[in-house]
Image: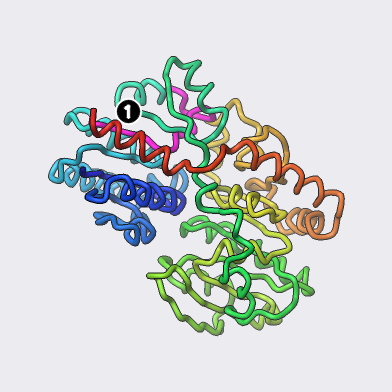
Amino acid sequence: MRYYIVAGEASGDLHASNLIKALREKDPAAEIRGCGGDLMRNAGADLLLHYKDMAFMGFWEVFVHLSEVLGNINKCKKDILDWNPDVLVLVDYPGFNLRVAKFAKEQGIKVVYYISPQIWAWKKGRIKQIKRDVDEMMVILPFEKDFYAKQGMEVHYVGHPLLDAVSRDLPERPDVINFRKNNHLDDREIIALLPGSRKQEINAILPNMLQMAERFPQYQFVVSTVSWLPKELYDKHLNAETRHEEMCHKETRHVETRHGTSLQEGNVFTICDQTYALLANTKAAIVASGTATLETAMIGTPQVVCYAGSEFSYLIAKHLISGINYISLPNLILDAPVVTELIQHDYNPERLEKELRLITEDANNISRMEAQYKELYTQLGNGSASEKAAEVVMETALK
């Protein structure tokens, strides 16, 4: 069968790639095309667009790039029509994907949505569009099934796909065991900096993260970078004389990249495409809001969550979001303050230093967070989310 899959962000690329692997196990003759990233391509998808050309964060940023966004939507619609898949699978990314869903439904193409838009937080009116344009919805958070039921829509709860990606055998992996040696790091404890995977996030979030290196000179700070963004994006926040040694083997997702910077007295480095190995070797982490907050929690690393963007986008989001108390996934799932969230104006060096000390020096706070992480893990399902999602996709294609 022919499957067209659209993912517009790094997290969607990860989950879509695992879905592709599950589809190929069940349907060895599967033909897969779509929009996504390197992980989808490595899993065997033929890509029309890479998400690096699709990912814009915030209302103002989308407005500024509106012509490019609309152009990508039109390219995707035309490609779907030309390729004529048996089923269209849309992975999160609602601003883009709901427009594509409407078009596909009008063309008589079956639509499966994998990972629901967060309509329980904002834009609840989208439920009407989802009911109209989506044949099957798959949700990954435990409370979402009840939310949809109250809206009169039956959905599939498949569990969280990160359980497939962050396996319990992580500590046994060679890349985890040899992480320090592979990346030329010394024996000092590590603080991980995860500034996101989009240019806007990195520009808004990384500078404050880097200030912590001066305030915590006893640690080595390691910035988690992504291979598809230019190193210059990171370098400009480090210093102009950053030493860059790069051995990038994208086909294996095992990239060694190191930056040392004299401005931080040699205690700031970067690694590329090794987030899980980094988190498994880290004392604590500062993490941009998004899927990475849940990955960090599942690996068991104490963290501070941060969000910053343009003031215009922040004010609009603050006005539109209602009915939720948190923005990070660990807090949302448990409906409790598992991790501290520093949002917009609260995300400043003074607050960040205070919270980083709490997750590196306060034993009671660290123990409390670790206990809540274990509770979080039990609520995310029993694994095999990708396999369950593949079954729904195939059943829909065969209808």
Please tell me how crowded label 1 is: few (under 14), some (14-19), or many (20+) other residues with Cα within 10 Å: many
Vertical placement of 232 versus 139: above or below? Answer: below
What residue lies at 53% left-to-right and 74% top-to-bottom? 235
Query: Quadrant of residue 215 in the image?
Result: bottom right
Label 1: element kind: loop
What's the residue type where badge 1 is placed? Val
Give percent across and percent down for residue 46: 25, 56
Whether residue 126 can be seen here: yes
Residue at the image point whose x is 46% and y is 28% from the top: 123
**Horizontal and vertical percent for residue 242?**
56, 82
Front-most of 290 and 12? 12
Rendered residue at 44%/34% (across/down): 116
Q: Where is residue 108 in the image (x, y as percent from the top left)?
A: 18, 29
Q: Name the residue under label 1.
A: 134
Q: Is residue 245 left or right of residue 41?
A: right
Residue 142, by quadrant, is top right
Q: Please give the count of numbered marks on the rendered protein.
A: 1
**Left or right: 373, with 78 as reference point:** right
Q: Which residue lies furthest to the left in this view?
A: 82
Residue interval drawn in magenta: 110-125
Left or right of residue 78: residue 121 = right
Is residue 348 left or right of 2 when viewed as pictured? right
